[in-house]
Image (tube, coloured by chain):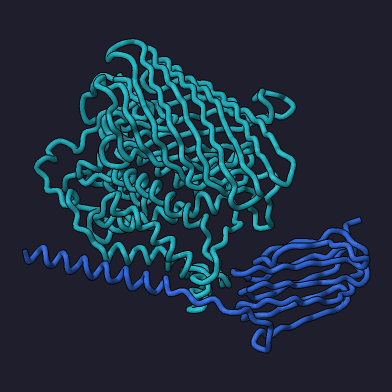
Chain colours: A cyan, B blue
Amino acid sequence: MLKRISGVLLAALLAQAGTLQAQGPRPAASLEPLPLGSTVPGWMQYDSRPDRAGSDTLPCPDCNPPKRFWAAFGELMLMQVIPHTINYNLRGAVWAEVTARSIRNNLSYPWQWDDNQFLNNQFSHPYHGAMYFSSARTNGYDFWQSFAWPFVGSAMWEIAGEAWAPAPNDFLNTSFGGVVLGESFYRLSTLTVDNTATGSERTWREIGGFLLNPLNGFNRLVRGQTHGVSANPPDWRPSKVVGVLDAGYRSISTSYNALDPESAVDQWDVAFSLAYGDPVKDIAGKPFSYFALAAELAGPPADSAHRLNRLSVRGSLGAWRLGSSGHHQFALSMGYDYYSNPAVEYGGQSVQAGVVSVFGAPGSDLKIQTAVLLNGIIIGATQSDYYTTLEGRDYDYGPGVGATLSGRLLYKRRVDASVGYNGIKTYTIDGTESSHFQDVVRFDARYWLNDRFGVGLGAAWYDRQSHYTDAPDVKETSSFFRAFISTAIPGVPQ
Amino acid sequence: MTSRNTNRSARGRQLGVLVVLATLLAASACSTPSETLGPDNHVKVTNLEGHFQLTADNIQNVTTTMTFKWQNPGIYAAIQHLSFAPHGTTLLIITDAVGTEVYNGKLLYEEDDRTLDGAPGEWTVTFSLNKSVAQIDVILDAAWPPD
């Protein structure tokens, strides 16, 4: 099922990217600052065209949509009622027996961190938050006006949607993660749909848009927007968009040698990266005018809960030019991270601030991008060596700080190499009394054989040093090696 | 002007809804002294050789400790956690026939667990509640390691 949905989504995005490619001449590629924390080459992007020929004369009812408070509020409530009804009426779950007394209890007793599994707390809750965000975002509200909705929705669910004690981790993951995933999926959904398309293309685009953001699809359906021709709002079309799909082999080892025959685990690996928007011109614009998304599936193990190895999204919040050269910008961004592979388990909500820079004149063969970012971890879930529960939680919760240093080199638009360092320190406030320092050094290189395909190698070395107050400290090491073929969607820029 | 007033009025109504909701949500109950278990809690104990079950419901802000002697002919006990304890703290502590603690954990919702191996005979089963809101349903069965 997941594969089928992924296939439709990918097809829809590919179709959109193909349209962007076909819609007009592209400007010469220029090297641009690194996407914040992204693996997507920022330079590998295309200009999009907002609409097909003749669309300038079309009406644009979606350009200034009215704010529909009651529709948004109703959908927010629907996002509470649906899961509650399923659990109460179909599953007969005791925790879904919400009464006046359970609400009173939730308001009067202390909140409690919960012990649910990693996937549930670090993916399902943020995704639920994305629905809360979307209830406002798809009803005429902009990013900042929609920002509070996952916070309100999460608070309502924690207090009156279930009888469990409200959990701070659920609230933080649902609200902050909901904003990041909500805005990203909203933009991907509006990128996929096309008001100027007709026939089967229109149908598939609407299906793709629905799957990427069910509330957007639902609202378009009930408002009759899934048919009829009108203009696409400019906001629906980023200035540039590009995806890179890697497929190949991955080896993970618990030593610094990723190919160590004693400890290495062989896996298939599929990674997809998407850069939405222009990382130079757009980061100073509306929030998430630029965002980078990275997802990775790998196996075995066949356990579907662990097949999603990574989902990371980082979106721009604003930027300010530093100096007169235009090479440097001070940028703010907001991120969501989910890592779950045989060596690393980490998830969190974060904000970043720092300097992104670009070196190399337009047209020159060698161009370099750099990023120096400080990372504020609002809430991080880090693998614990001692905290394990029957419910399945094996990680510590806490806030933290970190830094990201990265550089990317592009030579003659064929050789693309990047190196990066990420380090974060988290301080446990629920779990084992501890602090964790994690850092990773990574290197990736691609050689583009033509405009569409390339080959690449990647390696990463990861350390986790966990200091426990009442137990022996633990140092975990692991390394990764990847060999892959890549395809650029819609293609490597000329 | 009319349009602006209408917008303002609509915004006022929306704000009103949010304020009412917030007030409802923020109407926190006062903290009250904790209770003990009573007839309303329908405490039921099944205590047989090799099988033990305790159920109780409607537990609201209860602090108490209940201790039972249970004949366990097995090497360990299989535990079925069917409780729901959203607030306060709950503990299940089990000691074997020679007084060694073989289990110490909170009451859980729909989980299976087991004690450590222990000496067969008269085991002690203790339920400890502290300002708990809960429904309790715990089943213990004698168990032996596979040959």
The quadrant in which residue A493 appears is: top left
Q: Residue at x 30, y 62 (%)?
A: A72
Does the image show residue A254?
Answer: yes
**Relative height, residue A453 to residue A429 (above, below):** above
Count of labels in the image: 0
As drawn, the residue found furthest toward the top would be A365
User: Relative to residue A91, is residue A331 depicted above or below?
Assistant: above
Q: Nearer the viewer, residue A172 or A433?
A: A433
Q: Quadrant of the C terminus of chain A?
A: top left
- Counting from the top left corner in percent of width and height, residue B25 is at 42, 71
Q: Residue at x 36, y 71 (%)?
A: B21
User: Within the image, what quadrant is residue A308 found in?
Assistant: top right
Residue A287 place in picture, x, y as percent: 30, 42
Quadrant of residue A461 within the rendered picture? top right
**Residue A483 placement, left or right of A364:** right
Toward the viewer: B119 or A218?
Answer: B119
Q: Residue furthest left?
A: B1
Front residue (pair A255, A23): A255
User: Please, is residue A463 above or below residue A358 in the view?
Assistant: below
Q: Residue at x 68, y 50 (%)?
A: A387
The image shows residue A183 at horizontal and vertical percentages of: 35, 47
| Residue plotted at (69% across, 27% down) | A255
Question: What x and y, as percent, mark residue A356?
Answer: 36, 27
**Any part of residue A19 in sight:** no
- Return the residue found at the far bottom: B39
The answer to whether A59 is drawn above or below residue B56 in the figure is above
Q: Which residue is more in the foreground, B97 or A193?
A: B97
Q: Is residue A253 left or right of residue A165?
A: right
